[in-house]
Image (cartoon, grey):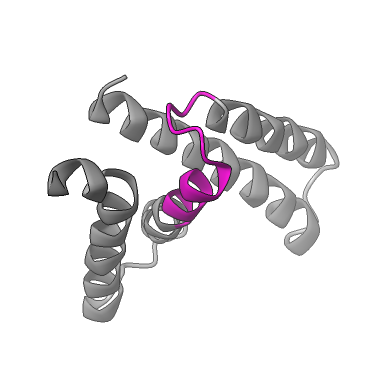
Amino acid sequence: MTYVQAIAIFVAAAAAELSGAYAVWRWRRAEGPVVLVVVGLAALFVYALVQTYQPEARFGRVYAAYAGVFLVGAMLWGWLVDGRMPDAFDRIGAGIVVLGIATILWGRKLAG
């Protein structure tokens, strides 16, 4: 499995988790229809299932790296869905997180 495939799995997982959590958030916080709970739970299940396709066999390593993907995804979600533009500190932090993700997943391979 290539780096691109691993990243695609992370992006798909983040999209599922963020949309699932957002659906439940909208139901609870905006008094949305109950169907949002069902949609949200289904999306959260898809998120968990998608993560199992990662090539890395170590659960902790995969989820540590994914935490960074989720953080960047959550900021992008806030910008694209909620209209909240990330500020300079958000962008700098996201850059640091992306370096952390790459270090966790591929640092050993790149080091030799």
Residue 99 falls in image quadrant: bottom left
- Residue 92 is situated, as x and y percent measured from the top left of the image, at 22, 73
Q: Is residue 107 above or below residue 93?
A: above
Q: Residue furthest top?
A: 1
Q: Residue furthest bottom?
A: 89
Q: Quadrant of the C terminus?
A: top left
Relative to the observer, which residue lies in front, 68 or 77? Answer: 68
Residue 81 shows up from this direction: no
Q: Is residue 40 above or below residue 100?
A: above
Residue 64 shows up from this direction: yes
Q: Is residue 12 above or below residue 112?
A: above
Q: Quadrant of the N terminus?
A: top left
Residue at (26% x, 55% y) in the render: 103
Q: Which residues are magenta?
A: 53-67
Q: Is residue 101 above or below residue 56?
A: below
Q: Residue furthest front?
A: 112
Main SS of residues in magenta: helix
Residue at (56% x, 36% y) in the render: 16
Residue at (80% x, 41% y) in the render: 37
Relative to the observer, which residue lies in front, 76 or 2? Answer: 2
Residue at (86% x, 41% y) in the render: 34
Q: Is residue 65 magenta?
A: yes
- Residue 44 is situated, as x and y percent measured from the top left of the image, at 68, 38
- Residue 90 is situated, as x and y percent measured from the top left of the image, at 30, 73
